[in-house]
Structures are given as structure tokens and as C-alpha cells.
Amino acid sequence: MARLIGFARHLALAALAVLLPAAAFAAPEGCPGLVAERHLPILRAAVGPGEVGLTFVGHATFLIESAGGTRIATDYNDYVRPSVVPDAITMNRAHSTHYTDHPDPRIGIVMRGWDPAGGPAPAWDRQIGDVRVRNVVTNIRQWGTDATIREGNSIFVFETADLCIAHLGHLHHTLTPEHLRQLGRIDVVLVPVDGTYTLDLEGMLEVLRAISPRVMIPMHFFGTWTLERFLERAKSEGWAVERREEPSLTLARATLPARPTVVVLPGR
């Protein structure tokens, strides 16, 4: 019975997403399925010179590890955290499963993708060890209303080992030519694929086509239904799909696939 109720809930969300434009879709505070803090084990990627380690911790949180030992966690929050203390964290404004007001005090650098005082998001450009972290400011919907908060959120870009990795965060709109110019060359995209709480599926595919990365790693999906829906559309775009058994992988410019490839890491 519980399984049938859960499936019916997914169908209801999908129907609502079709009937309402993305800008009008209001989600509750927090995403489904994240109700208690969890510190998930990290299987550390073996990172050598010219490489980057990437671990999918869960939801929208990844741990990025450089060859120089720098560790950065994306969308750090109170629900899904890496088991190690990162050197720096990024967060986006969407809701409490994407940020925290109480990060671990041992974290040296906290980068919020919005201005808590209500102004435009700050322009980040920090060198943290051998990783450069910068942001591209985006807009965001205000939960519970049709209002748009202009310049209220960010895409974070991580540059190391001649690779550029973009975390799209809780993206709610397609990208303008100016956004794309600011992003520059992106090799790896961490992309939300739920299609309802963030940008709708067709809009997200438009974003991926515009960025044109070599590797796309899905995140922010709720169960297999939303993930498989994205993968089927990805295949129709002519992109390859690889499924990994471990949540960690090692990236290097020399081993990037020639064909755009979606790499699925196990996670929530």
C-alpha cells in the first residue's frame, strides 16, 4: 500500500508540473525524503596529478577533492553531509536541504550563493589551495509565491587540473548568452534532473545543450522514476549513458569521453 501511495504521489507531481509553468510551481520547504541528518561514508577517490576526485554524497551534495588535497562540498546542509570536514563549502538559497545556518565551525571558507541581507548575490572568485572557485549569479523562484528573486542565487564553478566543473544548484530558468559567457568552457556539469522542483526537463536539456559539457552527472532526483525519465531523454539527444557502482570517480582532462556522456553515480 505504501508503495502504491508513493507512486501515486509521483504521478500527481508530474501532472502538476505539466499543467503549471515552472515559474508558478511552488514546492514545500525542503525536498521530499530528507528528514534527518545523515553523514554518509566517503569512498575517497584516488587522486593523482592532473586529476580530480568527485564523490556523490547525496541529493545535491558532492565532495570535490583536488590533487593537492583540497576538499570542497557543494550544497552543504543539515541533512546530507560528507563524513570528512571539507576545507570550503558552497550553498544555494533554495531551501534548507541546500544550505545551513550552522556549518561545522572547522570549515574554513563558507560561500553562500546569495546575499542573506536581501541584495544581489556576491561575486565569488577564490583560490582555495589548487582549486579556483567562482560563481555565476542566477535568479530563483521564491517558494510559495510566483515571485522571482533577481540575482538571488548562483551556479558555482570549480577549476582545477585543467578541468572546469559546474554545479547548477537549484536552477529555475534557462541561461542567457551572458550566463554562458560567464561560465566559459565547462567540462563537467552536476545537473538537477527532478524536472519539477527545479527547472522542467525540457528546459534543463536546453541548458545542457547550451553548455555542451563532456560529462553530465545527475543529482537532485527522487527515486528511479525521475532519473530514468531524464536518462531516456538524454539518450534521445544522442548522449551516452554510463552507470557506476561506486559513488566516487576520478576525472582527468586526458580521459574525458569524446562523446557527451551522462555518468550516473549511486545516491539519493
Image (cartoon, rainbow, N blue to C red):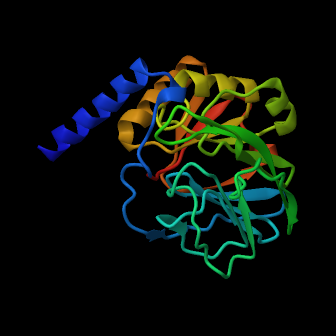
Could you say which quadrant of the image residue 203 lies in? top right
Q: Is residue 15 left or right of residue 75?
A: left
Q: Nearer the viewer, residue 138 or 86?
A: 138
Expressed as whole percent of the image width and height from the top left, the position of residue 204 reads 60, 28
Residue with the most extreme bottom position: 106
The structure residue drawn at horizontal position 63% and vertical position 52%, both measured from the top left corner, is 92
The relative height of residue 56 versus residue 229 in the rendered view (above or below) is below
Give above or below for 17 relative to 92: above
- Is residue 101 in sight in this rendering? yes
Q: Residue at x 49, y 52 (%)?
A: 59
Q: Is residue 200 visible?
A: no
Residue positioned most to the left: 1
Which residue occupies 83% across, 55% down? 124
Marks counted in the figure total: 0
If the image is split into quadrants, where does the N terminus sit? top left
3 horizontally vs 50: left or right = left
Q: Position of residue 63 (x, y in %)?
A: 63, 62
Which residue is more in the foreground, 236 or 209? 209
Question: Residue 206 at what x, y percent from top left?
Answer: 65, 22
Residue nearer the viewer, 249 or 177: 177
